Image (tube, rainbow, N blue to C red):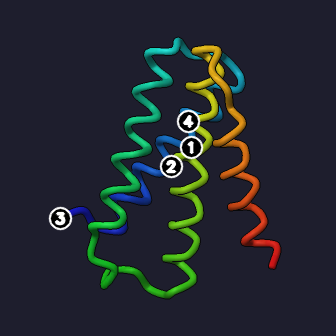
Amino acid sequence: MTTIENIRDKLEQIERGLFEHSIHPMSSTELLRLRQDALDLKENFLNSSFMSANTIEELEDIRFRVLEVEVGAHIFASEAMYQSTEEPMRRLNDLYQTTAI
């Protein structure tokens, strides 16, 4: 079973990968791998035991960041393959609007 700490570590690794891509673009293969890592992370988060989290706010922060990297990786991979990013951009915008409320 994946712990919240493992999820946090993997999340930081994916976030770092997305940041590095913005500085030095990755190949589409690497971006697809990063996207799959983000999807796997989301699945692991949903299947994890939330008992190891300290607070609800911590879980909400992790949930937001997991969704943010999942959509961000989707956008970067779609751009690299010259596909439309309209749907993932809408999802990202909706995610950001949920925090503005």
Q: CA distance from mark 3 to mark 4?
A: 26 Å
Q: Residue at x 68, y 32 (%)?
A: 85
Q: Which residue in the protein does label 3 denote?
A: 1
The crowd level at tag 4 (other Cα within 10 Å; few <14, some 14-19, many 20+) is many
Q: Which residue is under mark 1?
A: 15
Could you tell me if the residues under marks 1 and 2 are in contact, i.e. CB atoms within 8 Å? yes
Q: Residue 87 location in percent, x, y? A: 66, 41
User: Residue 33 appears at what percent x and percent y?
Assistant: 40, 27
The answer to whether 100 is drawn above or below residue 88 in the figure is below
Between disc 3 and disc 4, the foreground one is 4
Give the residue pinned by disc 2. 12
The kind of secondary structure element at disc 3 is: loop
Residue type at the position of mark 1: Glu
The amino acid type of the residue labelled 4 equals: His
Marks 2 and 4 sit apart, C-alpha to C-alpha, by 17 Å
Which label was assigned to residue 74? 4
Left or right of 29, for residue 70: right
Mark 2 and mark 4 lie on one chain; the one further toward the N terminus is 2
Element class at badge 2: helix
